[in-house]
Image (cartoon, grey):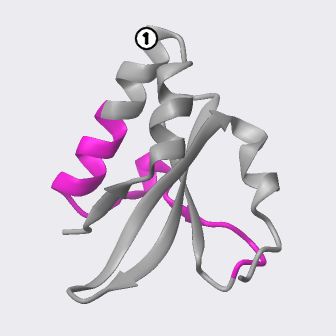
């Protein structure tokens, strides 16, 4: 079961979304934590990030950006961004 941290910037972006998209985004995160990601969630590594950034489908057109992090308890994902499908391009190629 993956662990999840919600970044404050993610919360601000979430608050600006249409209520229906916000609800679907929240539901996607609950499903992500509740069970291992499956193909239907379109949980994918973002190319060129050495596995650090991942994309998770919120709706057909919106994606959640997750960053793989590590803390004292091990690996976890931080929800850092949400937006239209092409949002992943902001993170493609990042390896920091």
Identify the residue at image location x=39%, y=25%. 24
Would residue 31 be visible to someone looking at this image? yes
Would residue 75 be found to the left or right of residue 81 on screen? left
Identify the residue at image location x=53%, y=52%. 80
Q: Quadrant of residue 50?
A: bottom right
Quadrant in which the C terminus appears: bottom right
Would residue 29 be found to the left or right of residue 15 on screen? left
Image location of residue 81, percent across then percent down:
58, 46
* Nearest to the observer: residue 80 or residue 31: 80
Quadrant in which the N terminus appears: bottom left
**Relative height, residue 1 to residue 80 (above, below):** below
Magenta part of the chain: 27-49
Residue 34: say if magenta. yes
Residue 20: say if magenta. no
Image location of residue 70, percent across then percent down:
38, 84
- Labels in figure, total: 1
Image location of residue 49, percent across then percent down:
71, 78
Image location of residue 57, percent across then percent down:
51, 42
| Element at label 1 | helix
Identify the residue at image location x=59%, y=81%. 51
| Residue assigned mark 1 | 20
Q: How dense is the environment of label 1, judged by Cα within 10 Å: few (below 14), some, or many (20 and up)? A: few
Q: Quadrant of residue 29?
A: top left
Would residue 64 be found to the left or right of residue 87 on screen? left
């Amino acid at each position: 079961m993956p662990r999840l941290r919600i970044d404050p910037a993610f919360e601000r972006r979430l608050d600006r979304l249409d209520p229906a998209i916000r609800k679907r985004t929240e539901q996607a995160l609950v499903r992500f934590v509740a069970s291992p990601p499956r193909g239907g969630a379109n949980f994918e590594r973002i190319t060129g990030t050495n596995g650090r950034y991942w994309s998770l489908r919120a709706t057909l057109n919106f994606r959640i950006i997750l960053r793989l992090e590590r803390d004292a308890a091990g690996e976890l994902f931080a929800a850092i961004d949400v937006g239209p499908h092409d949002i992943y391009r902001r993170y493609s190629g990042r390896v920091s």
